[in-house]
Image (cartoon, grey):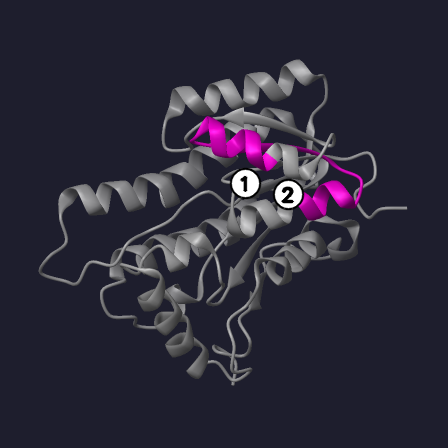
Amino acid sequence: MGRLDGKKALVTGGTSGIGLATARRFAEEGAHVFVTGRRQAQLDEAIASIGPGATGIRGDVSDPADLDRVFEAITDHGAGLDVLFANAGGGEFAPLGEISHEHYADTFGRNVAGTLFTVQKALPVLNPGASVVLSGSTAASRGTPAFGVYAASKAAIRSFGRTWAAELVGRGIRVNTLIPGATATPGLTGLAPDPVAAEAMLRGMAASIPMDRVAQPEEIASAALFLASDESSFMTGGEIFVDGGSEQI
């Protein structure tokens, strides 16, 4: 018996990295998983890898019209949502003095507005007792040079988590924030100019982590599963750090 048997889940940004690993894990645990992604070919590949327990819906969370289509498709499927993992987002390095309006708007559009309007548009389809999991980052807990806009966007998400937990507790809906540390994902390694630089970047990050390594996406997915399942039934407004001890020790 799976921990999400009979449940319906939505994972935004589920075509690679943490999102894909989580969508796979949710499906393995019995959920039917709706997965969004911006690129159709990558979305099709992800759905094929997850199996029959998944439905792909192309969409960009920073586009309100795309979000409308996502939730129309879920409604047409005939059931509400029991789990929402608002995972889509990303960022790029840009030091103070070189931050453009485009960089700011893109980062906050995906991470802050994308998360806000994903959750808001999900409200009509969230079932009583549903679990909402937001995607934070340890970047919001420390000063990382050239990552200020991304860190600020993730700090906003942590604030959303506390506020929304208070607003939705009357509906029996739980809201918690998952805060990964450095994780070996295409989104992270893609910040480097080439594979050699990416490997060096991961080694440098690992050196600052007490467990002396970066996380694998499947490890973050395990924590997402806990927050999605009834095993975390007495948690709301909380945060779970999955960071190898980097913010704890």
Q: Secondary structure at mark 1?
A: loop
Residue 14 shows which numbered tag? 1
* Residue at (26% x, 56% y) in the render: 149
Q: Is residue 160 magenta?
A: no
Q: Is residue 208 visible?
A: no
Tell me the crowding category of disc 1: few under 14, some 14 to 19, or many 20 or more residues within 10 angstroms, Cα based: many
* Residue at (45% x, 78% y) in the render: 206
Looking at the rendering, the stretch of residues picked out in magenta corresponds to: 23-46
Q: Nearer the viewer, residue 235 or 59?
A: 59
Q: Quick check: 79 left or right of 156?
A: right
Q: Is residue 216 above or below residue 13?
A: below
Residue ranking furthest to the left: 97
Q: How many marks?
A: 2
Figure quadrant of residue 211:
bottom right
> Do callouts 2 and 1 mark residues in contact (Cβ within 8 Å)?
yes
Residue 218 shows which numbered tag? none
For the residues marked 2 and 1, what is the alpha-carbon distance in whole angstroms? Answer: 6 Å
Tell me the crowding category of disc 2: few under 14, some 14 to 19, or many 20 or more residues within 10 angstroms, Cα based: many
Q: Which residue is mark 2?
A: 23
Q: Amino acid at mark 2?
A: Ala
